[in-house]
Image (tube, helix red, strand yellow):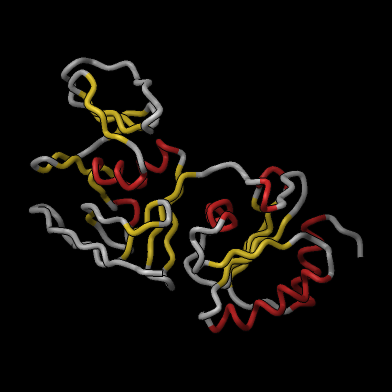
Amino acid sequence: MKKLLVSCLLLASASAAWADRLYVRNRPFEGYVIGTLDNLSALEVDARDFARALGYNLDEVDGNWVLRSPNDKSAPALTAGAHKLYAGGHELAYRADVDRKLVKLADLAQALGGRVVRHSELGTVDFDLINGYKEEIGFDPKQFHLIYYGADWAPAAKLFKPVVVEFDLKKLVPVIYVDCMQPRSPVYKNFIRYFNGDKIPYVVLLGPNGKVAKTWTGYQDIGPWTTEIQKLTGQRF
């Protein structure tokens, strides 16, 4: 997978330049971005560049700007000439810089129903829209699932994966494997939203209706780990 470094110019008021990699919908973001990996809440992108990366448009409507999908012609109630920016029907704060409109990535995620995930070991930040579960994954939202996040190059993940496989063979809870090096896979796209850690291996016990019951980071011993999962899922020994 070809990974491109995102470069950005320093704004006059900026305190730090972007030095990490940003992916939007599993592709390197080639637009204007400012901020650092250590402070995702302050990370800003140019609204037009971001819309292009997302496959959306940034339309000017009555002296305002509306970020929306190409098939969406709806718009919130607008005041002509107000110079406001909207996404997902929500007004978003932005900073003007010449011809750029700098918006916080976290605000865009909240407005559009997206997810921002930081992978410190991979050196990336990923933004993706949250979609419904796809049938080909074989996910039943009415029962518990164990979601394992790993990558074969990571020593700790390579050590722990056989333990996960051994647990999987017990058939106590269905296990879904998410390869963090395959961001275009349906499994990754559907379950990366639950990755709240910054290290792998990372495991989520997902309860009915997508409720997170428990998370683990790092290696786990099969015996105590199995017992804990049985208690969390209400299974009898």
Q: With respect to residue 173, does 159 lie above or below?
A: below
The image quadrant where one finds the N terminus is bottom left
Residue 228: x and y in percent read: 77, 66
Q: With respect to residue 66, does 34 lie above or below?
A: below
Left-right relation of 205 to 92? right
Residue 24: x and y in percent read: 37, 52
The image quadrant where one finds the C terminus is bottom right
Quadrant of residue 39 within the rendered picture: bottom left
50 or 237, nearer to the observer? 50
Could you tell me how many numbered marks the image carries?
0
211 or 185, nearer to the observer? 185
Q: Residue at x 63, y 78 (%)?
A: 219
25 or 174, nearer to the observer? 25
Q: Residue at x 18, y 59 (%)?
A: 8
Residue 159: x and y in percent read: 63, 83
Left-right relation of 62 to 133? left
Q: Residue at x 76, y 44 (%)?
A: 142
Q: Residue at x 11, y 53 (%)?
A: 11
Residue 194: x and y in percent read: 56, 54
Quadrant of residue 157 within the rendered picture: bottom right
Quadrant of residue 226 within the rendered picture: bottom right
Left-right relation of 134 to 141? left
